Amino acid sequence: MSLVAPVPNTAQDDARMNPQGPGVRWTIWLLVAVSMAFPVLPDTFTMNAMGPELTHSVVEGSLKRQIVFGSLFLGAALLAWRCRGSVLRNLRGMNIFLPLVVLYCLVSAAWSPYPEVTMKRTFIVMVLFLIGVAVAPPTGMTRQVGRITMGAYTLILVISFFVVLIDPGIGVDYALGDAWRGITWQKNTLGSIAGFAALFYLREAAMQPQYRGRYVAGLLFCMFMLVMSKSATSMLCLAVSAGIYLVVRRRHVGGRHAEAIVVLAGVVAALFALLLFYVVLGRMPTPKDLIAPVTALFNKSADLTGRDQIWDLVDLSIQRHPLLGIGYSAFWTGTGGPSQYIADKLGWMPAHAHNGFLDIINDMGQVGFGLFMACLLWHLYSILRLARMDREDAAMHLGICVAIIISNFSESQLLRDSAFQNALFIYSVVAVGARLAMARSATRTVPGASLAAPSRLPAWTAQGGGPGR
C-alpha cells in the first residue's frame, strides 16, 4: 500500500491542497518570475554586432540590478519570516553543501583581487538561496516554480516572436546565421529559456490531460522558438531532459530497490562503453571524444565553435591558484581585469569561459569545486530518495538537473550569480530537500511509517502544499 497520496492531476486540486492566501501567492509569483526573467533581459536595445550593448561597468554593476535584487531580498525575507516555521524545518533538512558553497563564495573575498565584486555577486547568490527557501514546499506548491517560470518565459518568447517580425535588427543575429535572439541577450539565451519552458509545458500536458491541447500548443511554440534560435546545446538539453522525465516518471522496474537498480545499470553501461573504447583505441577518451558524436548531430565542430581556445587560456589562470581559486566572480571583470590576457590573445573579451565547471574551478579552486560537486551529488541522491515517494516530481527535478549539467559544458551558468539556470538549480536543490524534510516530519507523527511507504500522511505532504494558516 502506498504511503503517499497521488499527485493531483489538476491545478484546482493543487491549489485546494495548499490554500495559499493571495498575499503569499502573489509574493511567490513575483519573486520567482522576476528572479528568472530579469537575468535574460538586457538593460538596453542598443545593438552592436554581438547583441545588446552593456550600459554599465562590469565591476561596478548596474543600479537597476541592485534595485531589483535588493527588492527581491526584502520580499523573500518577509515571506520567510511569515512562514518561518516551515522555513526553519526545511533549513534543518536541506542539502548542507549548498549553504557551504555560498559561504565559500563569501569567504573568497578575502583573497579576491576584486573583493567588492565578489561580495556583491555573492549577495545575489544569497538572495536566490533565500528565495528558494522562502518558496519551497510547504509554503509553495510542488509545481508552482515550474508554472511561474513557464509563464514568464512564454511571455518573453511571445514578445520576442513579434519583435523579430517587426524589427529584425533587434530580434535577429545576422552575424550567427540569422539566428533569432528576440529581446534576450543572445541566441543561446533565447534557445535556453525556450527549452526549459518546453520542458515545463511537457510536464503540464502530462499532468493535466483535460487541458492537454493548450499545453501541447505551448510546447510546440516553444520548440519553434528553440529551432529558430539555432542553439544546438539547448536542443540537446531539451531532448535529453524530456526523455529522462518521460522515462523516469513511470515505474519500469518494481521493488523497493528499483531506483538503485536503474542507477547501477547506468553505471555498468557507462563502464562497459569506457572499456570498449579503451580496447578498440588503446587510450582513454578525451572530452572531445565525448563531445564529437553529439556536436556532429548538429553540424558543429568538436571544439564547440572555438571554445577550446578559451578553455586553454582559462586553464593558465587555474594553474596559478589551483587550491582556493582567484575569488568568486573576480576573473571576468572586463578590460584591465585578470582576464585581460585572454582578450589580448583572442582579440575580443569573452564574458565567461563558456564552460560552467571551468569557471567554478577558476573562481573557487579545488576546494570550492569539491564543495559544489558534493552539493550536486547529494542533490542527485536526494532526487533518488524523492522518487520513492513522488516519482513524477523526482523525474522533473532530475530532468532539470541533467539539462543544466549538459548546458554548462558549453555555457557558463552554474554559480554565475544571477544567471537563470543558477537560480533554477538552487530552487530545485532547496525544493527537493524541503519535500524530504516534510516527509520525515510527517513520518515522526505516524508510527511505523517510512519514507518509502507513507498513505497515512496528510494529502498536502505529497503535493508539497501546506495546511491553511
Image (spheres, rainbow, N blue to C red):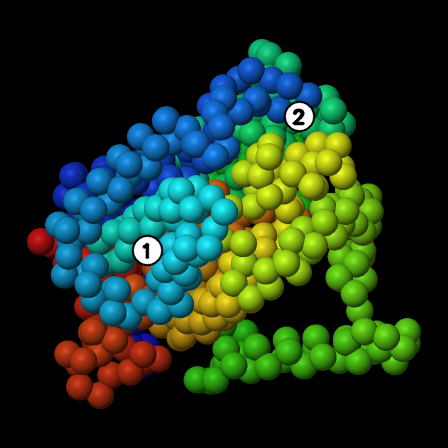
Q: Nearer the viewer, residue 263 or 135?
A: 135
Q: Residue at x 54, y 54 (%)?
A: 326
**Which picture quadrant has residue 252?**
bottom right
How far apart, in angstroms, are the residues tagged by discs 2 and 1? Answer: 39 Å
Vertical order, 362 against 25 (above or below)? below
Q: Residue at x 79, y 58 (%)?
A: 288
Q: Nearer the viewer, residue 43 or 427?
A: 43
| Image quarter (top left, top right, bottom left or bottom right) of the N terminus | bottom left
Instruction: Tell me: 83 left or right of 343.
Output: left
Q: Is residue 101 visible?
A: yes
Instruction: Tell me: 12 left or right of 238.
Output: left
Q: Is residue 245 visible?
A: no
Q: Could you tell me the amino acid type at mark 1?
A: Thr
Vertical order, 285 against 305 (above or below)? below
The circle drawn on residue 50 is 2
| Mark nearer the N terminus (2 vs 1) | 2
Q: Nearer the viewer, mark 2 or mark 1?
A: 2
Q: Nearer the viewer, residue 239 or 89?
A: 89
The circle drawn on residue 142 is 1
Instruction: Tell me: 431 left or right of 404.
Output: left
Asked whether the beta carbons under mark 2 and mark 1 sit within 8 Å of each other, the answer is no
Which residue is at the far bottom? 448
Vertical order, 29 against 136 (above or below)? above
Instruction: Tell me: 407 left or right of 437.
Output: right
Query: Residue 167 location, x and y as percent?
Result: 60, 12
Q: Residue at x 20, y 46 (%)?
A: 77
Which residue is at the far left? 469
Query: Residue 232 location, x and y as percent?
Result: 70, 43
Query: Residue 194 location, x and y as percent?
Result: 55, 38
Q: Residue at x 18, y 80 (%)?
A: 444
The circle drawn on residue 338 is none
Mark 1 packing: few (<14 Cα in 10 Å), some, or many (20+)? many
